[in-house]
Amino acid sequence: MDISVDTLRLQIAGMDAITAHRFARLVAERLAATMPQETTEPGQRLGSLKVSHQARLGDSPDNLAVATAGDISRAVRSAGLRTGRG
């Protein structure tokens, strides 16, 4: 599978800059681990994707990163990218 993410923008309310940076890194790492395993057809592109996740009171940045990456991965799957498998 070859998936390239040019830009990952996260809007994070209530986190200081250091925590937000750590959170963004955690999301990117988890996203790399949870992306669909199918091979997409060459040349496919998904221009943008908007995913919203509501944090629960007391969620740690680690747990929130896992949930956010899962939401993004599911949204990519449901965006209808065709796979190269017949």
Image: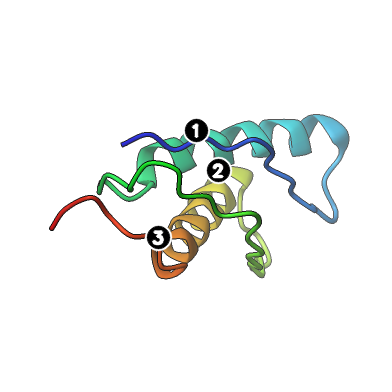
Proximity of marks 1 and 2: CB atoms separated by less than 8 Å: no
Which amino acid lies under the numbered mark 2 shown in the image of this protein? Asp
Q: Is residue 60 left or right of residue 80?
A: right
Left or right: 85, with 15 as reference point: left
Residue in the picture at 80% in, 29% down: 18
Amino acid type, mark 3: Leu
**Residue 13: x percent and y percent?**
84, 56
Q: Earlier in the sequence, mark 1 or mark 2?
A: 1
Q: Residue under label 3, please give it.
A: 81
Q: CA distance from mark 2 to mark 3?
A: 28 Å
CB of mark 1 within 8 Å of CB of mark 3? no
Q: Earlier in the sequence, mark 1 or mark 3?
A: 1
For label 2, the SS is helix
How far apart are labels 1 and 3 at the CA level?
A: 22 Å
* Vertical position of residue 51 compared to residue 38: above or below: below
| Secondary structure beneath label 1 | helix
Nearer mark to the viewer, of 1 and 3: 3
Q: Quadrant of the C terminus?
A: bottom left
Q: Secondary structure at mark 3?
A: loop
**Amino acid at dot 1:** Glu
x and y percentages locating residue 58 in the rendered image: 65, 60
From the image, tell me which residue sits under label 1: 29
